């Protein structure tokens, strides 16, 4: 049995420790801002669905822009992207503070500002989460993800209560000002961080090609697809409690902004407890069991909150969904990171965030409309039923355990010497590999080639095909395309250590004295352009 790694072990890494501490200040300010925005909305409108849209307006840009941010994180300097995101949020927060102080905020203008802050979060998150795997070792990644959750929820346990006190004493503008100041420490920590430069002689992928490559990898990874589906269901159902909590504080328990802050604090305390218990629970429960437990915990809590009119009871119950929130989301995040190699981890995380925060954004709106139509208690009760459906989904497609697989590059590819003078952008490139396979080995060969097809497409190949020679039945030809020569080189460099078994087994089945013959070709059109055909060789049909 592998030695258990302590939860606090990543703190031995100075870079991780410094950025983690600076993140506390940023998270603290963000939560105070969230309290100020949510409570201000209750002050400037009586519409319950508008209140719920405050959370949706923060989650929506993460759903919309995470894919682009993930592609940028895999192709540009991640520290620079994070600095740009923090600087953008600083400017937006200062502007929001001024508007609030001058009394210029309307409900839709407040949603616009929270949406813009969400855009900054969308740009920052994939770069930061992908950087965690660059800063700490793979063995410590689950602990690092857990510590990030602990840090966020440490601030959540006290930040909202302090935010509520600030709003009650000095108004929402003061809360927004605190948030603006909170970005400074993290920006300073990022400026001091000197990440290793990623040497790559190849040109950067275009945005569309990077997104396509990320989609190709995710679509060929059953584990990541499973996480996306469960994350979507979790976000859709679990968003009800946080989205409707301002209305619960105002109407069900008849409190004020301080009451709302205390309830959010209780949620944060539960989250810290869940994070601290995370490592122990992973030892005794399967990943799927933890996810189901999280869904059921949210369902039970939502049902109780819907019926409770007591502040103390509601705050106590909120400890449970707080713990379940961290258990589920940190497990989803870790599973995605452990299932993706470094070249695509930012994009894989962005797909996960798009699914989860898309569920949160849509769910926040749905439960807000339900509360407006049927009342907050009915809305929370319906959300409880939706959470039970999410738990039952695991019966058909359970989440796998963390896989101990080697996702480091295989590094067997040497770029061939070419007699044609190609540029990285030259293409399209067509690859054909000839194999000589005995009749008795065909079933095993076809099984291996099915696995190889998944790997080829996962790493960026197009139009993959397997053909058999009609005149020489022992000859099989694998064929695929890449858009450019740079894409062909990049495709081969993406091959992983776990793929070596497939490649070696196929090569062993090949009967030829030499290895399989590889044909590397570039497409060239031989048909002249239409203008040549119809202008130089015009035929009068009349």
Image (tube, rainbow, N blue to C red):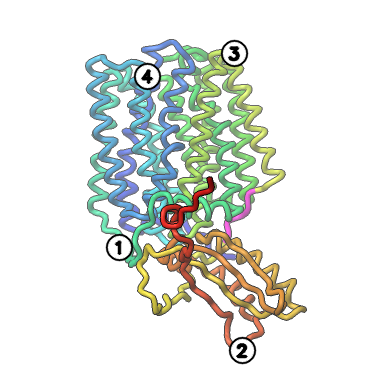
Q: CA distance from mark 4 to mark 1?
A: 43 Å
Residue labelled with disc 2: 513
Residue labelled with disc 3: 374
Instruction: Report crowding for label 1: few under 14, some 14 to 19, many 20 or more residues within 10 A (C-alpha).
Output: few
Number of marks in picture: 4
In this rendering, which labeled residue sits more in front, label 2 or label 3?
Answer: 2
Looking at the rendering, the stretch of residues picked out in magenta corresponds to 399-403
The mark that comes first in sequence, 2 or 1, is 1
* Residue at 64% over, 47% down: 288
In this rendering, which labeled residue sits more in front, label 4 or label 2?
Answer: 2
The mark that comes first in sequence, 2 or 3, is 3
In this rendering, which labeled residue sits more in front, label 2 or label 1?
Answer: 2
Q: CA distance from mark 4 to mark 3?
A: 24 Å
Q: Is residue 495 above or below residue 78?
A: below
Q: CA distance from mark 3 to mark 1?
A: 55 Å
Instruction: Report crowding for label 2: few under 14, some 14 to 19, many 20 or more residues within 10 A (C-alpha).
Output: few
Verify whether residue 401 appears in magenta. yes
Q: Secondary structure at mark 3?
A: helix
Instruction: Report crowding for label 3: few under 14, some 14 to 19, many 20 or more residues within 10 A (C-alpha).
Output: few
The mark that comes first in sequence, 4 or 3, is 4
Verify whether residue 233 appears in magenta. no
Residue labelled with disc 4: 108
Residue lying at the far front in this picture: please name it: 542
Q: CA distance from mark 2 to mark 1?
A: 42 Å
Residue labelled with disc 1: 197
Tell me if label 3 and label 1 are in contact, CB under 8 Å: no
Instruction: Report crowding for label 4: few under 14, some 14 to 19, many 20 or more residues within 10 A (C-alpha).
Output: few
Q: CA distance from mark 4 to mark 2?
A: 72 Å
Q: Secondary structure at mark 1?
A: loop
Q: Position of residue 431 (x, y in %)?
A: 52, 70
Q: Quadrant of residue 30?
A: top left
């Amino acid at each position: 049995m592998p030695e258990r790694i302590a939860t606090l072990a990543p703190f031995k890494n100075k870079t991780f420790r410094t950025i983690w501490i600076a993140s506390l200040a940023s998270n603290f300010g963000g939560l105070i801002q969230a309290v100020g925005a949510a409570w201000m909305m209750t002050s400037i409108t009586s519409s319950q669905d508008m209140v719920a849209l405050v959370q949706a307006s923060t989650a929506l840009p993460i759903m919309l822009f995470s894919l682009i941010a993930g592609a940028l994180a895999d192709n540009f300097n991640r520290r620079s992207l994070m600095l740009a995101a923090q600087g953008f949020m600083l400017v937006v927060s200062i502007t929001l503070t001024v508007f609030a102080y001058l009394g210029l905020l309307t409900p839709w203008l407040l949603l616009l500002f929270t949406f813009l802050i969400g855009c900054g979060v969308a740009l920052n998150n994939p770069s930061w989460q992908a950087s965690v795997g660059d800063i700490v070792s793979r063995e410590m990644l689950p602990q690092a993800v857990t510590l990030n959750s602990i840090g966020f929820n440490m601030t959540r346990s006290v930040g909202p209560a302090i935010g509520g006190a600030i709003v009650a004493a000095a108004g929402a503008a003061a809360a927004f000002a605190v948030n603006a100041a909170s970005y400074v420490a993290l920006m300073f920590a990022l400026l001091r961080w000197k990440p290793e430069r990623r040497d790559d002689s190849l040109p950067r992928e275009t945005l569309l090609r990077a997104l396509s490559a990320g989609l190709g990898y995710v679509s060929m990874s059953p584990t990541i697809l499973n996480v996306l589906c469960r994350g979507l269901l979790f976000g859709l159902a679990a968003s009800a409690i946080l989205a409707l909590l301002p209305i619960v504080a105002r109407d069900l328990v008849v409190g004020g902004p301080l009451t709302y802050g205390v309830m959010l604090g209780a949620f944060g305390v539960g989250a810290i407890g869940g994070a601290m218990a995370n490592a122990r629970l992973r030892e005794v429960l399967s990943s799927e069991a933890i996810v189901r437990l999280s869904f059921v915990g949210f369902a039970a809590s939502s049902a109780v909150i819907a019926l409770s009119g007591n502040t103390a009871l509601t705050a106590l119950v909120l400890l449970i969904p707080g713990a379940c929130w961290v258990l589920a989301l940190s497990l989803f995040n870790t599973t995605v990171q452990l299932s993706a190699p470094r070249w695509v981890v930012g994009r894989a995380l962005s797909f996960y965030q798009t699914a989860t925060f898309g569920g949160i954004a849509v769910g926040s709106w749905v439960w807000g409309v339900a509360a407006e139509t049927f009342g907050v208690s009915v809305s929370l009760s319906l959300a409880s039923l939706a959470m039970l459906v999410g738990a039952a989904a695991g019966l058909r497609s359970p989440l796998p355990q963390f896989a101990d697989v080697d996702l480091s590059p295989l590094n067997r590819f040497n770029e061939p010497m070419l007699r044609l003078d190609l540029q990285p952008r030259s293409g399209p490139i067509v690859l054909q590999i000839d194999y000589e396979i005995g009749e008795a080995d065909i079933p095993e060969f076809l099984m291996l080639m099915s696995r190889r097809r998944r790997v080829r497409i996962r790493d960026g190949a197009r139009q993959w095909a397997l053909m058999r020679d009609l005149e020489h039945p022992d000859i099989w030809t694998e064929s695929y395309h890449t858009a450019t020569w740079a894409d062909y080189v990049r495709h081969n460099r993406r091959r992983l250590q776990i793929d070596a078994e497939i490649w070696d087994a196929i090569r062993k089945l090949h009967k030829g004295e030499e290895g399989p013959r590889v044909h590397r070709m570039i497409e060239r059109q031989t048909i002249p352009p239409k203008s040549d055909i119809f202008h130089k060789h015009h035929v009068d049909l009349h």
